[in-house]
């Protein structure tokens, strides 16, 4: 009997102590939360609190988030490790910084939200719309990059090529026009870029060459200018 009672007590303790959650998980207290555990269930929601103070979520090593993840209402998400296995929606002027970890599901950035990517792995591409902004300095990107309705996507690196043509600068189709192509290049951290593009409805893609490339481009322009003057 004593052994049974101890077993029941241990099970109750584990149920409250082990940080593995189910159903819908909501973070809305305006505090900082470190996730280094498993989350199961239907969805994770991150909101600001009653006083409009932003809630911060740090996704770190050992985190495994299986349900859909919704970052809303000016929330701040830092991803340096772990994995998000389902859809990841960033909305309502929220901010996300990705320096590590993995995002395996559909990644959507919308409603004037801002994302900075310096590392990590994105396995299913990125959809950006409604004035969402994404800046990419590093990391491994797989899947299609789709931009629409005033979205902005910026890559920092070198050797940018679209459909076999070396390019840099900003590309933005107007009105109902769309730009499709295949983008390759090297990001600042040395990672290779190799993705299909779809840009439409006043969205823009900007390719910013790293300082060394800028110097080389400047020297090339200077040499060309001198040749023209000498002729």
Image (spheres, rainbow, N blue to C red):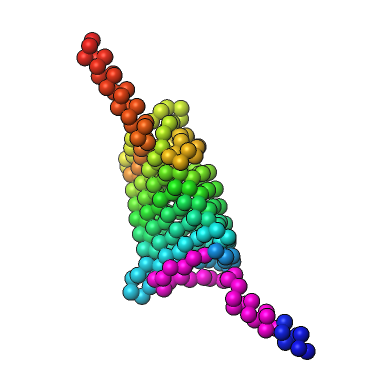
- At 59% across and 65% down in the image, what residue appears? 38
Q: How many numbered discs sit on the rendered protein?
A: 0
- Quarter the N terminus occupies: bottom right
Q: Is residue 216 above or below residue 26?
A: above
Query: Which corner quadrant of the image does residue 97 belong to?
Result: bottom left
Q: Can the viewer see residue 223 in this picture?
A: yes
Tell whether 231 sits left or right of 179: left
Q: In the depicted view, which residue is nearer to us: 32 or 108?
A: 32
Q: Looking at the picture, does residue 46 appear above or below residue 190?
A: below
Q: Position of residue 127 (x, y in %)?
A: 45, 49
| Residue 146 image point, x, y percent | 44, 45
| In the rendered image, the vertical position of residue 220 relative to residue 36, given as above or below | above
- 40 shown above or below 13: above
Residue 14 magenta-highlighted = yes
To which quarter of the image does residue 90 belong? bottom left
Is residue 177 in view?
no
Q: Residue at x 62, y 77 (%)?
A: 15
**Residue 85 placed where, x, y %?**
57, 57
The residue drawn where x is 44% and y is 37% is 180
Q: Quadrant of the C terminus?
A: top left
Query: Going 63% across and 80% down the picture, which residue do you hit?
Result: 13
Q: Quadrant of residue 64?
A: bottom right
Per the image, is 61 magenta? no
Furthest residue in direction bottom, as rendered: 1
The x and y percentages for residue 209 are 37, 35
Q: Residue furthest left?
A: 229
Write the start and end of the magenta stretch as one range.
8-35
Q: Residue furthest right?
A: 1
């Amino acid at each position: 009997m004593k052994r049974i009672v101890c077993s029941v007590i241990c099970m109750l303790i584990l149920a409250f102590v082990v940080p593995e959650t189910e159903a819908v998980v909501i973070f809305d207290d305006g505090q900082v939360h470190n996730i280094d555990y498993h989350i199961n269930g239907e969805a994770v929601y991150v909101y600001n609190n009653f006083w409009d103070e932003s809630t911060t979520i740090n996704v770190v090593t050992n985190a495994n988030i299986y349900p859909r993840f919704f970052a809303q209402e000016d929330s701040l998400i830092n991803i340096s490790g772990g994995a998000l296995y389902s859809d990841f929606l960033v909305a309502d002027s929220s901010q996300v910084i990705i320096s590590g970890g993995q995002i395996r599901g559909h990644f959507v950035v919308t409603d004037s939200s801002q994302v900075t990517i310096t590392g990590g792995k994105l396995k299913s591409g990125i959809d950006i719309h409604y004035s969402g902004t994404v800046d990419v300095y590093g990391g491994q990107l797989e899947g299609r990059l789709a931009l629409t309705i005033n979205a902005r996507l910026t890559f920092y690196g070198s050797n940018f090529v679209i459909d076999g043509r070396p390019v840099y600068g900003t590309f933005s189709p107007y009105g109902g026009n769309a730009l499709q192509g295949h983008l390759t290049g090297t990001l600042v951290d040395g990672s290779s870029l190799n993705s299909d593009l779809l840009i439409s409805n006043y969205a823009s893609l900007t390719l910013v060459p790293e300082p060394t490339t800028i110097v080389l481009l400047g020297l090339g322009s200077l040499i060309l200018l001198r040749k023209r003057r000498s002729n």
